[in-house]
Image: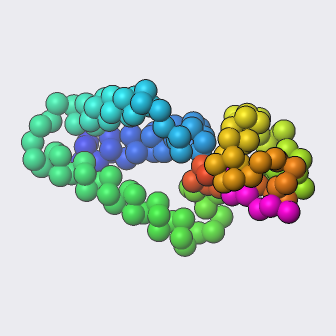
């Protein structure tokens, strides 16, 4: 039972940290970020199992994580009010060719990042954009004029 409680705590801690980090940071991982994730994974394993190297302990932790993942997906599907908390909401970053500076600051994005995403989608100028939306997965969707 102790393994289950520690796993539940760690699951929600990781969930809170990933939501706080932001969607843009999670969608564009650098090599350092990958190393950090591996190290965090090892630290989480040590914190959850507390040197319990048994098959039963590992199975309990994996099953608990899988159930929590399925449960949060089910909650997001069934309870509409929880979706913004669990999945995030799309954020408008450009409307009628004008940047929404406030939304960019909130998402910790720079104008250069938006311009780079526009160039990747063959958009030469932000003035040609009717609107751009930072999706909950960290990608930017553009609609041109």
Q: Residue at x 39, y 34 (%)?
A: 34
Q: Position of residue 64 (x, y in %)?
A: 30, 54
Answer left or right for 14 relative to 53.
right
Between residues 50 and 26, which one lies in front from this camera angle? 26
Residue 126 position (above or below residue 113)? below
Residue 28 position (above or below residue 64)? above
Q: Residue at x 15, y 36 (%)?
A: 52
Q: Position of residue 23 (x, y in %)?
A: 59, 45
Answer left or right for 141 relative to 72.
right
User: Where is residue 112, by image quadrant?
Assistant: top right
Q: Residue at x 53, y 70 (%)?
A: 77
Residue 87 position (above or below residue 74)? above
- Quarter of the image containing the C terminus? bottom right
Answer left or right for 36 relative to 90.
left
Between residues 125 and 20, which one lies in front from this camera angle? 125
Q: Position of residue 103 (x, y in %)?
A: 79, 43
Residue 134, visible in the rendered structure: no
**Residue 95 in magenta?**
no
Q: Residue at x 68, y 41 (%)?
A: 116
Between residues 59 and 20, which one lies in front from this camera angle? 20
Residue range in magenta is 140-145
Q: How many marks?
A: 0
User: Where is residue 106, by image quadrant?
Assistant: top right
Name the magenta segment's main secondary structure.
Answer: strand
Answer left or right for 131 relative to 41.
right
Between residues 20 and 131, which one lies in front from this camera angle? 131
């Amino acid at each position: 039972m102790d393994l289950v409680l520690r796993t539940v705590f760690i699951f929600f801690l990781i969930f809170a940290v990933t939501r706080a980090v932001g969607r843009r940071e999670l969608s564009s991982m650098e090599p350092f970020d990958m190393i950090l994730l591996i190290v965090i994974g090892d630290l989480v394993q040590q914190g959850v199992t507390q040197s319990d190297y048994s098959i039963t302990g590992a199975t309990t932790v994996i099953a608990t994580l899988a159930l929590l993942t399925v449960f949060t997906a089910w909650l997001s599907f069934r309870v509409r009010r929880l979706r913004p908390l669990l999945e995030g909401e799309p954020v408008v970053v450009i409307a009628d060719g004008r940047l929404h500076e406030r939304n960019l600051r909130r998402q910790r994005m720079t104008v250069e990042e938006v311009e780079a995403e526009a160039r990747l989608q063959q958009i030469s100028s932000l003035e040609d954009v009717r609107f751009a939306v930072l999706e909950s997965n960290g990608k930017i969707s553009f609609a041109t004029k």
